[in-house]
């Protein structure tokens, strides 16, 4: 039960942070979801750092990993919103933005995870 509560608390806080990023960064003028992009990239970097620290000499225990990685990062990042935004790009015929947003999200997201692990390991 404690594990469920940790994930719940972390996820709620992460979701609230994602909402605020979207509110202030998503552009209604261009339609480009900068907030979702930022949340997914920052979340990828954070999970890399969190899991890198957890793996390094077991510096973070399982409870903090549940709170921060599973809960916060899980609530902060969002694949469903990413998928919907891509649907909107495709529906409107904005194939270039769809392509750039999708490719940049995957490449930079993966790079951010590896960067987070690298920073913990070598810095």
Image (cartoon, rainbow, N blue to C red):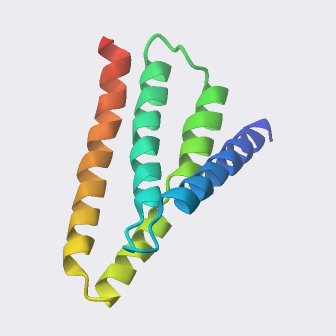
122 to the left or right of 120: left
Q: Is the residue 7 above or below the residue 93 in the image?
A: above
The residue at the far right in this view is 1
In the picture, which quadrant includes the N terminus? top right
* Percent x, y of residue 14: 62, 47
In the picture, which quadrant includes the C terminus? top left
Q: Name the residue rendered at 45%, 62% in the picture.
A: 79
Q: Name the residue rendered at 39%, 82% in the picture.
A: 88
64 to the left or right of 6: left
Which corner quadrant of the image does residue 70 belong to? top right
54 to the left or right of 19: left
Q: Is the residue 47 above or below the residue 21 in the image?
A: above
Q: Report the number of numbered marks.
A: 0
Q: Name the residue rendered at 58%, 61% in the picture.
A: 23
Q: Is the residue 7 above or below the residue 49 in the image?
A: below
Which corner quadrant of the image does residue 15 belong to? bottom right
* 68 and 102: which is toward the camera: 102
Q: Is the residue 7 above or below the residue 22 in the image?
A: above
* Percent x, y of residue 106: 28, 54
Q: Name the residue rendered at 44%, 67% in the picture.
A: 27
The residue at the far front in this view is 29
* 4 and 47: which is toward the camera: 47
* Percent x, y of residue 98: 26, 73
């Amino acid at each position: 039960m404690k594990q469920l509560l940790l994930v719940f608390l972390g996820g709620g806080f992460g979701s609230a942070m994602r909402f605020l990023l979207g509110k202030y960064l998503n552009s209604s003028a261009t339609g480009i979801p900068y907030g979702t992009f930022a949340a997914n990239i920052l979340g990828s970097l954070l999970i890399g750092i969190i899991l890198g620290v957890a793996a390094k000499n077991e510096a973070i225990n399982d409870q903090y990993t549940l709170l921060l990685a599973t809960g916060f990062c899980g609530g902060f990042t969002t694949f469903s919103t990413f998928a919907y935004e891509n649907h909107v790009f495709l529906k409107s015929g904005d194939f270039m933005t769809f392509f750039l947003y999708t490719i940049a999200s995957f490449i930079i997201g993966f790079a951010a995870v590896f960067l987070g692990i690298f920073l913990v390991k070598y810095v």
